Image (cartoon, rainbow, N blue to C red):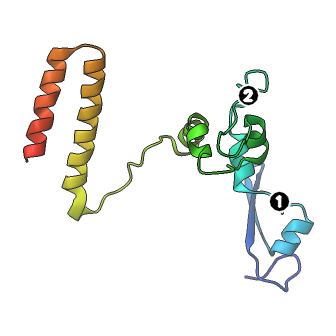
Amino acid sequence: MLCQNCGEREAKVSITQIVNNKKTEIHLCPQCAQQSGHIDPVFGLHKMLASMMDWNPEKSQAKTCPGCGLTEQELHQNGRFGCEQCYETWAPLVEKILSRVQGRTTHTGKVPRSAGEKVKKERELGELRRQLEQAVAEERFEEAAQLRDKIRELEKQ
């Protein structure tokens, strides 16, 4: 499809507007879309993710990454990590962003039918182990013993 503005280049940007319950679609090439202000050439995913962080300068903990020295303020401005240690340093912020974007922080997507039972069993074992740790930590030993037995039974199968 050709650009509806210039009619010369291929349209790669589709813009849908709904005004007074009337839907209008415009198909533009990247150059025309940028000239008309419909796309931002410096927009990046990192800026969008940075805007999703609940950042309050007054409540900031003045935390820095021990690996690269990235501060919380720099992370908020750039939306990018500086090194591999940043993933550990900023884990709570990453978890908040992921839960906001994805709805959860663990993958629970589709599983191939051929591996379905095995994956289901592994997930169940993982959940039972988590419950067992929590029961032991809270000193609910009878419940912990029952969970331990369930785990052993599942592992035998």
Residue 16: quadrant of the picture: bottom right
Residue located farthest toward the bottom when viewing the structure as drawn: 8
Q: Which residue is mark 1?
A: 42
Residue type indicated by callout 2: Ala
Q: Nearer the viewer, residue 120 or 83?
A: 83
Residue 109 lies left or right of residue 97; in this view the side is: left
- Crowd class of label 1 (few under 14; some 14 to 19; many from 20; radius 10 Å): few
Q: Secondary structure at mark 2?
A: loop
Would you say the residues marked 2 and 1 are in contact, meaning their CB atoms lie under 8 Å apart? Answer: no
Residue 137 lies left or right of residue 72; in this view the side is: left
Across and down, in percent, residue 97 comes to 60, 40
N-term mark: 2 or 1 = 1
Residue 30: quadrant of the picture: bottom right
Q: Nearer the viewer, mark 2 or mark 1?
A: 2
Residue name at image x 73 percent, y 67 percent:
14
Residue name at image x 23 percent, y 33 percent:
128
Across and down, in percent, residue 92 comes to 57, 34
Q: Nearer the viewer, residue 144 or 50?
A: 144
Residue type indicated by callout 1: Val
Q: Which residue is mark 2?
A: 62
Q: Establish if 66 lies above or below 21.
A: above
